Amino acid sequence: MNNNSMSVIVRTVTRFMYGLIILFGFYVIMHGHLTPGGGFQGGAVVASAFALLLVAFGSAGLKGQLNLHWLQSIEEFGALAFLGLAFLGIGTAFFYNLFANSGGFLFGASVPTGSNAGVLTAGGLVPLMNWAVGLKVMTGIAAVVIVMLVGSHKEETE
Amino acid sequence: MIVQSILHVVVLVLIVIGAALAVWFKDLLSSVLALAAASLLVSLEFYMLQAPDVAIAEAAIGAALTTAIYVIAIRRTARKEEE
Amino acid sequence: MRKAILFVAFLFVGAFLLLGVADMRPFGEPQMAVMDDYYIQNAQPEVAVNNAVTAVVFDYRGFDTLGEATVLFAAVVGVLGLFRKLREDER
């Protein structure tokens, strides 16, 4: 039980599972406009993989691999990207979906009405906002968990 | 239809039992695990009510992230509840 | 004494919940279905998105998502600021 890490069973299962959880989270973000889920849900899934890693391996397991400044920068980039994408359609209205059904190459395709399999390159600003919110949520929650684990390290060593 | 209703009732009763156990336990780690189980059952109930978006969010936030944060907090503080 | 007060409060809240249950509508029948029908009919032609919930969250009700993102940002900044002193002491 040194180094704050959990037992060998937890560590082995974590080593096997965290890649799959991160992959599922990115799938949820990427297909947010087609399948259930979206930026917030996918980001929370990815952040839960980071939290699993931190709980299983302790603060030493991530030392130097996830930089807190990078996480903060990506989180602020996500927030500003979301706001900027919302401002793109300010000519009509705030949060106006500028690219939907425009026929352009950036998610401009149209979707047939009724139940269908969905078009990955459709949706206008919605997939871009999914990515912005997903990046924001995953890095924000990961930064919170890391800072709670590493930042409260001092009292324990005393 | 009747099977679905029975399943709803069973899941809802299990949610209430999990929440009551989370209050009742004196060991805080057991309490957190009971809360995680109740949260996972809430997520299952959302899925059965055909709200998969909310189910994914509840499973990720309620069952995984809050449990991790509580486990970290319990590791830093006391494990037993004081009277 | 304290337990008696808690019990009375419990009975009070429980009575209100039971009163609310008494005139509940049947399950799965919303009172106002106009807005739901609009979203279901127009999410695909207008927003070009198959997932109507995402269309509501990021297009029709974008302000709600902006507020939620602001709340999350404030929470992250608050936690980072709370633990900053400890991290600087550690250095």
Image (cartoon, coloured by chain):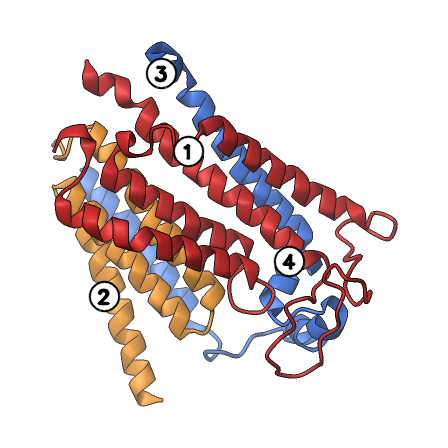
Chain colours: A red, B orange, C blue
**Residue A127: x %, y % from top left:** 64, 58
Residue C18 locus on image (x, y percent): 36, 66
- Image location of residue C88, percent across then percent down: 40, 12
Q: Quadrant of residue A120?
A: bottom right
Discs 2, 4 touching: Cβ within 8 Å: no
Q: Seen from this angle, which residue lies furthest right?
A: A91
Residue under label 3: C86
Subunit under mark 3? C
SS type, badge 3: helix
Which residue is label 2 attached to? B14
Q: Identify the mark at residue A66; answer none if there is no mark.
A: 1
Q: Nearer the viewer, mark 3 or mark 4?
A: 4
Pointer 4 residue: A127
How many tags in the picture? 4
- Residue B48 falls in image quadrant: bottom left
Residue A97, above or below B48: above
Protein chain holding label 1: A
Kindly identify the residue that appears in the image at 73 percent across and 42 percent down: A84
Where is the C terminus of chain B found, in terms of image quarters?
top left
What residue type is disc 1 on?
Answer: Leu
Three-letter code, disc 4:
Pro
Q: Residues within 10 Å of mark 3 (few under 14, many from 20)?
A: some
Cα–Cα gap, marks 2 and 4: 37 Å
Q: Which one is nearer the viewer's eye here, A86 or A66?
A: A66
Mark 1 → mark 2, Cα distance in angstroms? 39 Å
**Which element carries disc 1, helix, strand or loop?**
loop
